[in-house]
């Protein structure tokens, strides 16, 4: 259909009218919008600008503070520790009651303090010192946690993990040190000095189970049940052997009549657990009975230690076999009481000779084989990686210094204190019983009567002087023999007629001695010098008194006759 001119004009007018209305509406909208901007936009922009300015200022301040703090390697702590200075000195700790905390920090981290750095991980001091000076390390942990870590003997290590750098608290390394002896290798000396140095050991993080129990007792509480107990200390608490006996067989053998699991005191084992799990401390136990533990007991000890302490060190000592066997034999004879033997008067000799023990006593032979270093150490090496053997004959330093300064991990304070102590010459030494043996043999053969017989006069004098201990007849005779031999005759105890070991036994002792020396005596074995010393032993310490020859000598027959007269009671 075609459109007329009138229709076209009409449509054109309507379209123009519609456009004019749309334009007018748009103009009104723009006018309204501008009117609102004038009312709302200005204060909003001002507020936004102020907020952005405040954020920028705060960011600038925080960044400057943190940058300066990191550059100076300052560790900010509450309670007065503000900084570790460039000279390696720590300031006084205000508000801290335990002054030992500051001392411990200075002692444990001397290598790092000179850098003026952050307190490191004690297990890797040098690495921490290097990392402390690098600018990409950041201290993110709260300062109170750091101070808490010092109180609990943990340290702060600085670690970088890409962009997520943070600090973490790492516990100190827990060490367990078990000194197994064997017998007659300075075990008593180590145990004695461990008692004397217990406070220094505690500074170094070490506790002993029996000392732990004593501390609990002083606090009025039992170590396991936390109940008030009698404050009288049981006698067995000071004997570490009862800890070792917990790893013995349940049924005693003929070799272990006095050493079996029946003597175990589990309170000591429980104290050891508390030392690790509650106190987070290292363990120190010294007991020569460990050298007598069977392989099953060594396995039990490994199970007890391995799950509670990070590092376990087994410490033994090596003493030359020919020297050790004499000392061990003399130690066993201490059980024989001279006065009791005189009263009983049952045996031909006061003491069984070394020859008798080696030739006829199967228990003695099994003991020396099982307890000696050559046998004991391999049993422990089957279960423990770190078994240290100290050479008893190394004179470059004492065995005590070697133990506390070289073997005991981290015992800095203990070593320092030990070096300041004047050492005792010897502890638990064996003395010759030659004169006792001779006196007993004379009594046994009726040449002298040593049994105590007090007359009325001496008994009354004894009552009046009850505070003065009267020497027994046996002691008087022993001293008289010693004085006659050494003062009158100008001889020694080795100058009596003797009977020595046969060659076959001597060869066995020498063979074992040489084997042990090659294994534990060091890289260079001076076999010639060692053999000379062995030959001296074979003519002295390995020999027994020839009692028949001595007591048939007119010289000693006359001596005992005179002594017998002196011992007769006055009428």
Image: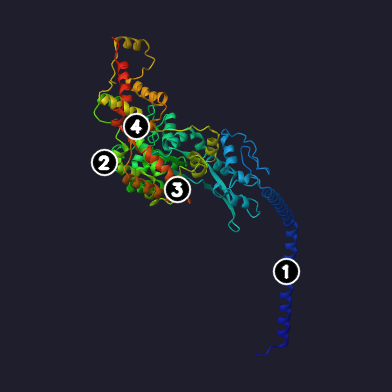
* Location of mark 4 (residue): 334
The Cα atoms of the two marked residues, 3 and 4, are separated by 33 Å
> Which percent across, then down, holds residue 564?
30, 19
> Which percent across, then down, holds residue 271?
40, 38
Sort mark 4 into few (<14), some (14-19) or many (20+) by Cα contacts within 10 Å: few
- Chain-order first, disc 4 or disc 1: 1
* Location of mark 2 (residue): 360
Q: Nearer the viewer, residue 198 or 366?
A: 366
The Cα atoms of the two marked residues, 3 and 1, are separated by 121 Å
Q: Label for residue 528?
A: 3
The Cα atoms of the two marked residues, 2 and 1, are separated by 129 Å
The answer to whether residue 559 is visible is yes
> Which percent across, then down, holds residue 240?
39, 36
Q: Residue at x 61, y 37 (%)?
A: 79
- Chain-order first, disc 4 or disc 2: 4
| Mark 4 or mark 1, whichever is nearer to me | 4
Are dots 3 and 4 in contact, CB under 8 Å? no
Q: Label for residue 26?
A: 1
* Residue projecting furthest to the front: 554
- Chain-order first, disc 2 or disc 1: 1
């Amino acid at each position: 259909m075609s459109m007329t001119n009138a229709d076209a004009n009409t449509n054109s007018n309507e379209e123009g009218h519609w456009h004019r209305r749309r334009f007018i509406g748009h103009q009104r909208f723009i006018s309204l919008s501008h009117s609102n901007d004038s009312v709302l936009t200005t204060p909003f922009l001002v507020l936004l600008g102020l907020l952005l300015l405040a954020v920028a200022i705060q960011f600038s301040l925080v960044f400057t503070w943190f940058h300066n703090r990191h550059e100076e390697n300052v560790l900010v702590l509450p309670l007065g520790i503000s900084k570790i200075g460039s000279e390696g000195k720590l300031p006084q700790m205000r508000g801290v009651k335990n002054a030992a905390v500051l001392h411990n920090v200075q002692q444990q981290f001397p290598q790092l303090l000179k850098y003026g750095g952050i307190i490191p991980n004690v297990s890797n001091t040098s690495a921490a010192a290097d990392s402390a000076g690098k600018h990409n390390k950041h201290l993110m942990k709260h300062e109170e946690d750091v101070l808490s870590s010092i109180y609990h003997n943990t340290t702060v290590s600085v670690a970088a993990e890409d962009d997520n750098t943070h600090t973490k608290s790492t516990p100190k390394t827990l060490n367990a040190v078990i000194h197994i002896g064997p017998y007659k290798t300075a075990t008593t000396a180590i145990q004695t000095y461990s008692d004397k140095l217990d406070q220094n050991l505690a500074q170094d993080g070490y506790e002993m189970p029996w000392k732990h129990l004593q501390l609990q007792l002083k606090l009025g509480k039992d170590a396991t049940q936390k109940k008030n107990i009698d404050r009288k200390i049981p006698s067995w608490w000071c004997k570490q052997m009862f800890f070792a006996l917990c790893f013995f067989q349940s049924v005693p053998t003929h070799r272990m009549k006095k050493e079996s699991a029946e003597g175990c005191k589990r309170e000591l084992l429980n104290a050891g657990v508390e030392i690790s799990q509650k106190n987070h401390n290292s363990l120190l136990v010294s007991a020569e009975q460990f050298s007598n533990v069977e392989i099953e007991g060594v396995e039990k000890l490994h199970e007890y230690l391995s799950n509670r302490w990070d590092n376990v060190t087994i410490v033994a000592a090596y003493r030359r076999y020919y020297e050790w066997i004499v000392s061990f034999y003399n130690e066993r004879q201490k059980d024989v009481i001279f006065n009791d033997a005189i009263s009983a008067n049952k045996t031909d000799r006061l003491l069984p000779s070394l020859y008798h023990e080696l030739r006829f006593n199967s228990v003695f032979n099994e003991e020396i084989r099982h307890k000696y270093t050559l046998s004991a150490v391999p049993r422990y090496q089957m279960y423990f990686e770190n078994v240290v053997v100290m050479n008893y004959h190394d004179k470059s330093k004492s065995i005590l210094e070697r133990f506390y300064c070289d073997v005991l991990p981290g015992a800095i304070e203990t070593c320092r204190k030990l070096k300041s102590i004047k050492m005792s010459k010897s502890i638990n030494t064996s003395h010759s019983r030659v004169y006792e043996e001779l006196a007993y043999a004379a009594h046994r053969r009726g040449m002298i009567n040593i049994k105590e017989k007090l007359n009325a006069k001496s008994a009354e004098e004894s009552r009046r002087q009850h505070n003065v201990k009267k020497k027994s007849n046996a002691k008087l005779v022993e001293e008289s023999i010693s004085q006659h031999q050494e003062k009158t005759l100008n001889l020694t105890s080795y100058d009596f007629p003797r009977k020595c070991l046969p060659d076959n036994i001597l060869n066995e002792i020498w063979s074992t001695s040489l084997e042990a020396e090659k294994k534990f005596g060091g890289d260079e074995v001076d076999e010639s010098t060692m053999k000379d010393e062995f030959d001296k032993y074979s003519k002295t310490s390995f020999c027994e008194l020839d009692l028949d020859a001595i007591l048939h000598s007119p010289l000693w027959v006359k001596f005992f006759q005179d002594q017998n007269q002196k011992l007769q009671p006055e009428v």
